[in-house]
Image (spheres, helix red, strand yellow):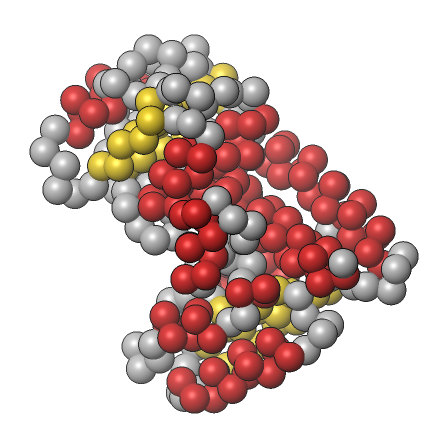
């Protein structure tokens, strides 16, 4: 492999140490940064994600509250709980774990969260702030990708970035963040007619569609930087991303592994957002 690995675990550790230091500064002023995590139902993957988020908070000196509810919880009950947390001065960030049971409108719940506590960055006010370059909370996964590019000292000015995927959680905000750094951005998706023609022009490729081997070595320009946001299983059941890691690693200059790449950064940026919410409330 010729590509250098962008180690998400190592970068996360450095960022979390900074979060712990800044959290202690707030604690010295009598403010404990607090995150409330709401889990509705018994989705196994959600339970793992939530457990990891709560543990990361505790390890970094943040206060975390995990509230678990039965899948039968009504939309009105969840909205009422969110509103109560909006008013709670000890809680600086609110995270409602998705997916929610089908009878609950997820977007309605997200919009019920105060923008000042929207540490997931999913509220329409957060999306608008990102679009217009105003202060707000950035969605954690693309935010983590930007930190990885920053960590390798990559200057995006004038570079061509291709984002594969157009979700509201990763693809669209990723494109806007890259654009803010003066990259020329192309968004590709399932209707893109010749994906290879687009990716071969790219200096930076972000793969975020949740499909194994969507990006292979013949689709990558030599020296490109490749960030793999995907989370899949190969036929042997082993965790893998959207990128053919072995093949692309022979062509790219930098690449993120799966696991150990973008994944740890997502939770880390949640901690950063929660800390920043607490710092803003303390001004």
Inspect this view and state whether residue 139 appears: no
Q: Position of residue 126 (x, y in %)?
A: 47, 57
Q: Is 113 rendered above or below residue 154?
A: below
| 222 on left or right of 25 | left
Q: Residue 37's spot in the image, x, y percent?
A: 57, 69
Above or below — where is 109 with respect to 206?
Answer: below
Residue at 58% over, 47% down:
269
How many numbered marks, from 0 up?
Answer: 0
Q: Quadrant of the C terminus?
A: bottom right
The answer to which of 235 and 114 lies nearer the viewer is 114
- Going 62% across and 70% down the picture, which residue do you hit? 36
Residue 121 visible, this orientation: yes
Work out whether residue 154 or residue 256 is closer to the camera in this orientation and state it.
154
Q: Which image quadrant: the N terminus?
A: top left
The quarter of the picture where residue 150 lies is: top right
Q: Where 51 sits versus 56, above or below?
A: below
User: Which residue is outermost to the left?
Assistant: 193
Residue at the location (42% across, 55% down)?
Answer: 128
Q: Is residue 29 rendered to the left or right of residue 219?
A: right
Which residue lies at the image location 88% right of the left edge and 60% below the top edge? Answer: 29
In the rendering, at what x and y percent does residue 276 appear? 67, 53
**58 to the left or right of 229:** right
């Amino acid at each position: 492999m010729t590509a250098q690995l962008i180690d998400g675990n190592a970068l996360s550790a450095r960022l979390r140490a900074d979060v712990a230091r800044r959290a202690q500064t707030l604690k010295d002023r009598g403010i404990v940064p607090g995150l409330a995590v709401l889990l509705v139902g018994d989705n196994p993957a959600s339970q793992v994600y939530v457990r990891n988020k709560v543990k990361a908070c505790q390890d970094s000196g943040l206060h975390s509250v995990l509230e678990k509810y039965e899948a039968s919880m009504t939309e009105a009950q969840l909205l009422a709980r969110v509103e109560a947390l909006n008013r709670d001065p000890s809680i600086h960030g609110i995270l409602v774990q998705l997916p929610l049971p089908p009878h609950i409108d997820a977007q309605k719940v997200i919009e019920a969260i105060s923008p000042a506590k929207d540490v997931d960055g999913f509220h329409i006010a957060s999306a608008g702030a990102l679009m217009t370059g105003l202060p707000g909370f950035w969605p954690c996964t693309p935010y983590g990708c930007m930190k990885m590019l920053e960590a390798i000292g990559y200057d995006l000015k004038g570079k061509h970035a291709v984002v594969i995927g157009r979700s509201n959680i990763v693809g669209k905000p990723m494109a806007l963040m890259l654009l803010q750094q003066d990259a020329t951005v192309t968004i590709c998706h399932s209707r893109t007619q010749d994906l290879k023609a687009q990716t071969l022009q790219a200096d930076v490729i972000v793969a975020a569609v949740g499909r194994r081997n969507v990006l292979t070595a013949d689709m990558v320009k030599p020296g490109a930087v490749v960030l793999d946001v995907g989370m899949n299983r190969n036929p042997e059941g082993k965790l893998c991303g959207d990128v053919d890691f072995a093949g692309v690693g022979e062509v790219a200059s930098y690449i993120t592994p799966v696991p150990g790449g973008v994944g740890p950064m997502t939770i880390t940026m949640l901690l950063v957002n929660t800390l920043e919410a607490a710092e803003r409330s303390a001004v």
